[in-house]
Image: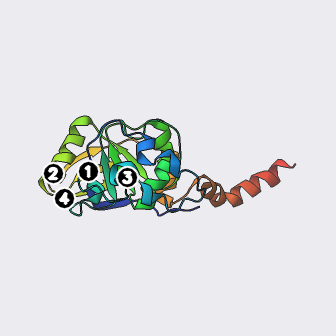
Amino acid sequence: MAYDKFTVLKSTAVPLPIENVDTDQIIPARFLKATKREGFGDNLFRDWRYNGDDTPKTDFVLNNSIYSGKILVGGKNFGSGSSREHAAWAIYDYGFRCVVSSFFADIFKNNSMNIGILPVQVSDAFLHKIFSAIEADPNAELEVNLPEQTVTILATGESESFDINGYKKHNLVNGFDDIDYLQAMREEIVAFAQKSRY
């Protein structure tokens, strides 16, 4: 399944300055029964977003209308816990295309890149600067440049580089998942197979 191509994303951001956010908090286990990657955004951070009677918790950031955008900024150690792919699905389905943190759990990081979400790992100091910029102005924008591998706070011009696996970068820039990547090489694979017959 192809995803939106990711090159340069300029957007406001939603701040979630909580450390050690695990995948059960991102999408509780009781919502994992579906097999299609649709509808999970409704239950993103479900137990933090809603009371027992399904009324929104007014103090949770996703219920605060002053914050919006395609970038989620989380605290250190984002996506720890179980390996459920549904956590990445929920974030994507909600509308986020990038998550910024100072540390990601490896499995969550890979699950995210596999479906078109860019996890951007920055230093603790730069993460603090991002949170401060959003606190000063909820409309502050970030620019995430995947080809250049930089994230910039546009209000201040401060920027930091981030690392990414070359294969995953190629797929994100082209909007590929692993199968799309192979299909894009179909002619080369067929040619190699035919050559290998002899």
Q: Residue 194: give x, y in percent of width and height.
A: 82, 54
Label 2 neighbourhood size at 10 Å, few (<14), some (14-19), many (20+)? few
Q: Tell whether label 1 touches label 2 (CB within 8 Å).
A: yes
Q: Which residue is mark 2?
A: 135
Dot 1 or dot 3: first in sequence order is 1
Residue at image location 21% in from the left, 37% down from the top:
125
150 relative position to 191: left or right: left
Q: Nearer the viewer, mark 4 or mark 1?
A: 1
Q: Nearer the viewer, mark 3 or mark 2?
A: 3
Dot 3 or dot 4: first in sequence order is 3
Query: Which colour style is shown?
Result: rainbow
Q: Calculate the distance from the C-alpha at mark 3 to the C-alpha at mark 2.
A: 29 Å
- In the rendered image, is residue 11 in sight? yes
Q: Which residue is mark 4?
A: 140
The image's mark for residue 15 is 1
Dot 4 or dot 1: first in sequence order is 1
* Quarter of the image where one finds residue 96: bottom left
Give, as a three-letter code, the residue at label 3: Gly
Q: Nearer the viewer, mark 3 or mark 4?
A: 3
The image's mark for residue 52 is 3
198 relative position to 24: left or right: right
Dot 2 or dot 1: first in sequence order is 1
Give, as a three-letter code, the residue at label 2: Glu
Give, as a three-letter code, the residue at label 1: Pro
